[in-house]
Amino acid sequence: KQEVTQIPAALSVPEGENLVLNCSFTDSAIYNLQWFRQDPGKGLTSLLLIQSSQREQTSGRLNASLDKSSGRSTLYIAASQPGDSATYLCAVSPGSGGGADGLTFGKGTHLIIQP
Amino acid sequence: ETGVTQTPRHLVMGMTNKKSLKCEQHLGHNAMYWYKQSAKKPLELMFVYSLEERVENNSVPSRFSPECPNSSHLFLHLHTLQPEDSALYLCASSLRGSLETQYFGPGTRLLVL
């Protein structure tokens, strides 16, 4: 059974710092890996999606990397801002892909950016 | 606005009540999902519907009953729930066969008394 672990569980940093969130998964047979953001009391917003054949994806100040063989992904946030405060979730899709596949999520990293 | 709406946003019910959660997607997707998010636990997949057929039932108790009458609507019927069923219930949709992500609704916050 696939398990996803996110480290750290919580992180508080001053505004302007660069930071890295970590995600690991036990079964490397994945179709893709996604990073989501969840604001309090709200649903999930997709940030980046990395296909299993890719090594990284970038969107603005966000960069996600994937090392499928070692079961690891990182989300790098550059020049953090108070608006980045949220819970960041990592999720993997099973190896078959192409169909309707439920995602397996980590517990998330609760991030606070201090003004 | 993600194109996936859920109603109600908040629900309080007793253990003997029957209620339903509704999800609607306006994205032309053909796969829909129910997830449960409990405190201090990862998001858990409950049900998957693809082309209006249930393709996955993740060992969910029978007091939760899903229904997908068409590709745009998904319901979760609730009956004789337990207090431990209190959670945020999230609906998502996707395009089967696509490389795109799943799009999530805002969720229904359920409290069972």
Image: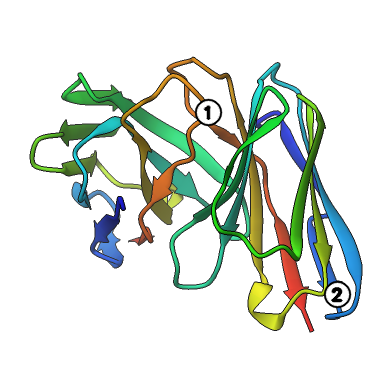
Residue B59, quarter of picture? bottom right
- Residue A23, placed above or below residue A48: below
Residue B29 left/right relative to B24: left
**Which image quadrant: the N terminus of chain B?**
top right
Q: What residue is rendered at 89% in x and 79% in y?
A: B16
Residue B90 left/right relative to A109: right
Residue annotated with mark 2: B13
Image coordinates for residue B103, horizontal then vertical, percent: 58, 32
Q: Are marks 1 and 2 in contact (CB under 8 Å)?
A: no
Please state which of residues B24 and A14 is positioned toward the viewer in this rendering.
B24
- Residue A32, placed above or below residue A14: above
Of all residues, the one furthest to the left in this rendering is A70
Please state which of residues A97 and A82 is positioned toward the viewer in this rendering.
A97
For label 2, the crowd category at 10 Å Cα-Cα, with few meaning under 14, some 14 to 19 and many 20 or more, is some
What element does badge 1 sit on?
Answer: loop
Number of marks drawn: 2
Q: Are marks 1 and 2 on the same chain?
A: no
| Colour pattern | rainbow
**Which image quadrant: the C terminus of chain B?**
bottom right
Mark 1 or mark 2, which is nearer to you?
1
Q: Is residue A115 visible?
A: no
- Circle 2 chain: B
For label 1, the crowd category at 10 Å Cα-Cα, with few meaning under 14, some 14 to 19 and many 20 or more, is many
The circle on residue B100 is: none
- Residue B37, placed above or below residue B14: above
The circle on residue A100 is: 1
Q: What residue is rendered at 15% in x and 43% in y?
A: A71
Please state which of residues A2 and A73 is positioned toward the viewer in this rendering.
A2
Q: Which amino acid lies under the numbered mark 1 shown in the image of this protein?
A: Ala
Image coordinates for residue B110, horizontal then vertical, percent: 74, 67
Q: What residue is rendered at 30% in x and 67% in y?
A: A9
